[in-house]
Image (tube, helix red, strand yellow):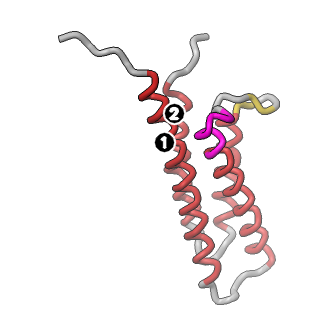
Amino acid sequence: MAASEPDPVRARHTTTRLLWACAVLTVLVAVFQLAGILSGNGEYDALAWVGVGVTAVCLLALVGIYCLCALDRLSLRTRVFRFDLFQVTTVLLLVAIVAGVLVPTRNTTALALLLPWGLTYWLHNLNQPAE
């Protein structure tokens, strides 16, 4: 039986769907963190509020990057200064997780960001250019 040829259109649609899924999963993490913050008993100190702010900025940046990649405006391989966009998302992820740990009521929710990041890791390394 002959192997079928890969369909580039179908592959692009699958990549787009996975990038949208990453954006939606990141928004869900943000919603869960917001729900935890709103249900908190006012036990936040200044450091916790810094964690909330930094995490929110990182989550908005991640959602924006995933959406722009899904809309074909950017690629995970787009260069930003000396780094590609995937490396930038990795730094944003790490900052969001560390800052999310500073928030007392939802310090493990930030770990859920590993799922969308794992999908982008897979997409980024799926078709590496030949060097």
Mark 1, Cα crowd under 10 Å, few <14 / some 14-19 / many 20+, is some
What is the total number of numbered labels drawn onto the structure image? 2
Say what secondary structure mark 2 lies in: helix
| The label number, if any, that marks residue 79 in the structure image | none
Ranked by sequence position, the earlier of labels 1 and 2 is 1
Residue sitting at 59 percent across and 69 percent down? 107
Residue range corresponding to the magenta coloring: 67-74
Label 2 is placed on what type of residue?
Answer: Leu
The one nearer the camera, 20 or 62, is 20
Residue 20 in picture, x, y percent from top left: 53, 47
The one nearer the camera, 129 or 94, is 129
Residue 30 in picture, x, y percent from top left: 61, 64
In the image, taking residue 80 as reference, residue 107 lies left or right, namely: left
In the image, taking residue 33 as reference, residue 58 lies left or right, namely: right
Residue sitting at 51 percent across and 33 percent down? 123
Write down the residue under mark 2: 123
Say what secondary structure mark 1 lies in: helix
The quarter of the image holding the N terminus is top left
- The correct choice, above or below, for 78 with respect to 105 in the image is above
- Cα–Cα gap, marks 1 and 2: 8 Å
Residue 119 in picture, x, y percent from top left: 49, 42
Of badges 1 and 2, the one in the foreground is 1
Write down the residue under mark 1: 18
In the image, taking residue 27 as reference, residue 8 lies left or right, namely: left
Q: Contact (CB < 8 A) between labels 1 and 2?
A: yes
Label 1 is placed on what type of residue?
Answer: Leu
Within the image, what quadrant is residue 113 found in? bottom right
- The correct choice, above or below, for 118 with respect to 107 in the image is above
In the image, taking residue 99 as reference, residue 125 lies left or right, namely: left
Q: Residue furthest bottom?
A: 41
Residue sitting at 70 percent across and 45 percent down? 91
Is-magenta flag for residue 72? yes
